[in-house]
Amino acid sequence: MPSFCRHNRLIQNCPICTREQDLELRPVVTPGTPAASARAPARPGSASEGSSRSAAGEPRTRSRARGAASSGMTVRRLARDADDGFHSRLVPGLRSVADAERLAAEIAFAATRLTRLQSDPPGPYAEVAASGDIEERTWLALLIAVLGPLDGDAPFAAIEAARTSWASGELPVLDDVALGPRTSVDPAGGARTLAFYRAWAARSGSQAAAITGDRGWSAERRFARIYERLALPGLQRGARFDLLVTLGRLGVYELRAGELALGGSDAVTLAAKRVLGIGDPMLLGRRAAELAEASGLPLEALDVGLYNWERRTRASLGLEPGAEPDPEALVGARAALGL
């Protein structure tokens, strides 16, 4: 009786499961075309003979099948460290200690950033956390998420220069504004995403009403529902997720991520597929939760952690240059991966 693996393949045909279970991978044999020597020779003067020669009687190379012409598809080579035999049940897609070490460091850094947002928010994050007009605080949090903090000594300088108040009704002028590495601004669209957001909030009467939703919702349900409702033109997954995480961590609204909201082709989703070794969104979410639980770190930390891991360069996202992960968080992440 044939046995199928979790990837819906025969176990002997699955390159992942055969490796995990020390089975021999069955070679895939496909029927080939008959050899040229086995074909019947064309009769002199037949159509087949004439089609292989040019009008001058010289042999002519057959044209390739349809679709052989350039389709404009771009192939991106994924950077990956050499396979050195590393294996972890939590991250079956990783095959090198170097990749695992980077992942542990980035998840720990992301968890450290979340702690800083709660205990000592940097720059304008502190203004969002302070008591005051909730509409202005929410608008500022959106600008931070959409424009994105810069890497360097003045991560919020461009945001401070471009920001407008919610009460003014004015949109920031984004011409020549430096954008952070995780910006959600489309250079061709300018501030149109912010205009869509204003219209979205106006339909509920205010930002506070739009983001609060039903007061009977749990923090997890509110996060999920508002994340879905914020699927506005130009407002990418990273900005939506970071906005709601920030507003929750800074105590502006009761918000807590119950899942990573993976999907599409953004950097976090692509990294999750590579690290967790599967593409099914439901299984991705389950494996991500298992990784966070085993590490003893918040699930939200996987968002920035996977983003920086895929990018292979750490975006500080508001922390000072050279900020390092908390040693305790790093120990937990490394232990979960068996490092």
Image: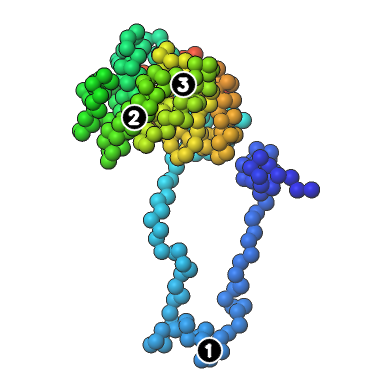
Residue at the extreme bottom of the image, as rendered: 45
Labelled pair 2, 1 in contact (Cβ < 8 Å): no
- Mark 3 crowdedness (10 Å alpha carbons): few <14, some 14-19, many ≥20: some
Rendering quarter of residue 248: top left
- The kind of residue on which mark 2 rests is Ala
Quarter of the image with the C terminus in it: top right
Labelled pair 3, 1 in contact (Cβ < 8 Å): no
The percent coordinates of residue 29 (x first, y second) are 64, 59
The percent coordinates of residue 226 (x first, y second) are 46, 26
Q: Mark 3 sits on what residue?
A: 213
Earlier-in-chain disc, 2 versus 3: 2
- Residue lying at 55% horizontally and 36% vertically, measured from the top left: 281
Colour logic: rainbow
- The kind of residue on which mark 3 rests is Gly
Q: Secondary structure under badge 1?
A: loop
Q: Which mark is residue 46?
A: 1
The percent coordinates of residue 41 (x first, y second) are 58, 84
- Give the CA separation, mark 2 to mark 3: 16 Å
Q: Mark 2 sits on what residue?
A: 199
Q: Residue 94 carries which label?
A: none
Earlier-in-chain disc, 2 versus 1: 1
- Residue lying at 37% horizontally and 37% vertically, measured from the top left: 233
Q: Can residue 65 be seen in this view?
A: yes
- Give the CA separation, mark 3 to mark 1: 77 Å
- Give the CA separation, mark 2 to mark 1: 72 Å
